[in-house]
Image: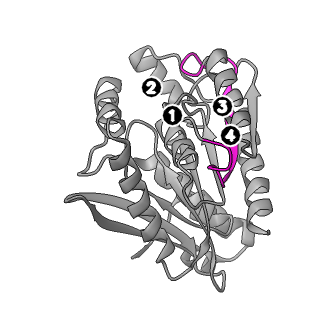
Amino acid sequence: MTSKLTPLAVGIALSLGAGTALAQLQTETVKYSVDGKTFTGYIAWNDAIEGKRPGVLVVHEWWGHNEFARDQAEKLAAAGYTAFALDMYGEGKVTDHPDEAQAFMKEATGDLESLKARFTAAMEELRQHDTVDGSRIAAQGYCFGGAVVLNMARLGMDLDGVVSYHGSLGSPIEPEPGTITARIQVYTGGADQMVPADQVAGFVASMQNAEADFSVTSFPGVRHSFMNPGADAVAEEHGMPIGYDQDAAERSWEGTMRFYQDIFSQ
């Protein structure tokens, strides 16, 4: 376990006006095994908070378990949750090239049972943490990760809620009414070429047929990967139709915080 002096931790300290706050953000790298493969997760919590609290799983973009995913876990810890940035690829698979990312994603999504097993193992790691109330668990995902958390909800996994940011909304899973117990929030870009309008409409129809409790927020003119501040540099380097949008990112995060306050207070 390490106390990490990240920019976020410094920000927390400054906002509280106390140098001791630097020690409050705790992080730990966790190794775990699924079907004989090694996976690396990253857990973050605030040790200034007493007692058990809800846990939130963070599922990375198609690039793999990278710094952005860990940063999101730290933001959640600062908000009062224990967060676990999990690893859906395993064995150190992380990249900054879209071709390799696509290959990683294709391998991970090729076997739905394996995907579920990887998610379940990470959820158990989070539940077992000393700071976590295992009866209150949510999951949020970005891009590939957004699709993952939505599919876990479609499969009826025991989650209070899931949040998808610019995640794929199509799925081979068509849940029956009553299958989905998690409440769902989706944030998507109105100019997202990877999640076009017909996919959004199909998702809405599927969720309505499943009688799910869900909401979809679409931001006009916003492209894919709008939550990630590094998206513009990737777009320029690889010619991808993606881009960061500060307003959409901030509104999505604020909506997520309200969502968690609501589902975890029930």
**Callout 2–callout 1 Cβ contact below 8 Å:** yes
Left or right: where does residue 226 sit relative to residue 6?
right
- CA gap between label 1 and label 3 equals 32 Å
Secondary structure beneath label 4? loop
Q: Secondary structure at mark 2?
A: helix
| Picture quadrant where residue 215 is located | top right
User: What separation in Å lies between label 4 and label 1 (alpha carbons)?
Assistant: 36 Å
Q: CA distance from mark 3 to mark 2?
A: 32 Å
- Residue 18 part of the magenta segment: no
Residue 65 seen by the camera: no
Quick one: 143 or 205, which is closer to the camera? 205
Magenta segment's dominant SS is: loop
Q: Label 1 is placed on what type of residue?
A: Gly
| Residue designated by label 3 | 206
Which residue appears farthest toward the left when viewing the image? Answer: 36
Disc 3 and disc 4 in contact, CB within 8 angstroms: yes
Q: Position of residue 262 (x, y in %)?
A: 80, 60
Q: Which residues are magenta?
A: 176-195
Circle 1 residue: 230
Under tag 1, what secondary structure?
loop
Q: N-terminal of the two: label 3 or label 2?
A: 3
Mark 4 / mark 1, whichever is N-terminal: 4
Query: Closer to the camera, 100 or 12?
Result: 100
Q: Amino acid at mark 3?
A: Ser
Q: Earlier in the sequence, mark 1 or mark 3?
A: 3
Q: Say few, some or many: other residues with alpha carbon within 10 Å of mark 1 (under 14 / 14 to 19 / 20 or more).
A: few
Which residue is painted at 36% across and 48% down in the image?
A: 113
Residue that badge 2 annotates? 234
Quickly name the residue at label 4: 210
Quarter holding residue 19: bottom right
